[in-house]
Amino acid sequence: MTRHTFLVRATHWINFLSFVALAVSGVAILLAHPRFYWGETGYFDTPAAFELPLPLNLDQSGWGRSLHFLAAWIAITNGVIYVVWGLLLRHFRFAGYNFLQRVAYWAVVFGLLPVTILTGLTMSPAVTAAYPVLFSMFGGRQSARTFHFFAADLLVLFLIVHVIMTIRSGYVNTIIRAEAK
């Protein structure tokens, strides 16, 4: 089994760690406000499009948002490095991957991740002040939050399946044996 280059392995591990931080901080943000809305406005006194059955904990929002912001920029920077490197060295021709794997990787790298990044940016008042077109793209800040939630769920699902399939393929054992030598 061929081993990925150091850059691919490093960017994957950085992504994994940043995604763990994003998931933990995302749950903290959800605990502070487990309701979702459509359009520009929404708060506890307005009707929600849907609400998650989570216990409300308003103490989670501060650290959760700070960690989410930090982990998101780490993931974005790491992703840009991975994509630029992958395009320059033709890594994305996906030799050895079947059709479904290729579709999944392309959908994540060039579909879900950009949507997640753009919806995350749309939730920032500073960003939307400079780029109000983001409101039009997603139908408002609260709609962007709803899109962000579902896109993030799909990314977590992809990550879980990706890790399981990597383990099942025997790749992890190959790495451990190769590094032990």
Image (spheres, rainbow, N blue to C red):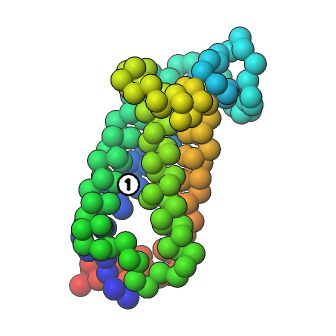
Asked if residue 173 shows in the view, the reply is no
- Judge whether 141 appears above or below 11 on screen: above
Looking at the picture, how far across and down is residue 163, in whole percent?
Answer: 50, 66
Asked if residue 62 shows in the view, the reply is yes
Hey, what amino acid is under mark 1?
Asn
**Residue 147: quadrant of the picture:** top right
Q: Secondary structure at mark 1?
A: helix
- Residue that protrudes farthest toward the top in the picture: 45
Q: Which residue is mark 1?
A: 15
- Judge whether 23 appears above or below 174 on screen: above
- Judge whether 40 appears above or below 97 on screen: above
Q: Is 49 left, or right, of 146 in this rendering?
A: right
Of residues 106 and 69, the one drawn nearer to the viewer in this rendering? 106
Looking at the picture, how far across and down is residue 74, in whole percent?
Answer: 31, 44
Looking at the picture, how far across and down is residue 92, in whole percent?
Answer: 37, 72
Of residues 19 and 141, the one drawn nearer to the viewer in this rendering? 141
Q: How many marks?
A: 1
- Judge whether 33 appears above or below 74 on screen: above
Looking at the picture, how far across and down is residue 88, in whole percent?
Answer: 24, 68
Q: Residue at x 39, y 27 (%)?
A: 131
Q: Residues within 10 Å of mark 1 (few under 14, many from 20)?
A: many
Of residues 61 and 113, the one drawn nearer to the viewer in this rendering? 113
Q: Residue at x 48, y 65 (%)?
A: 106
Quadrant housing the C terminus: bottom left
Of residues 39 and 123, the one drawn nearer to the viewer in this rendering? 39
Q: Residue at x 38, y 88 (%)?
A: 1
Q: Residue at x 38, y 41 (%)?
A: 72
- Residue that protrudes farthest toward the bottom in the picture: 1
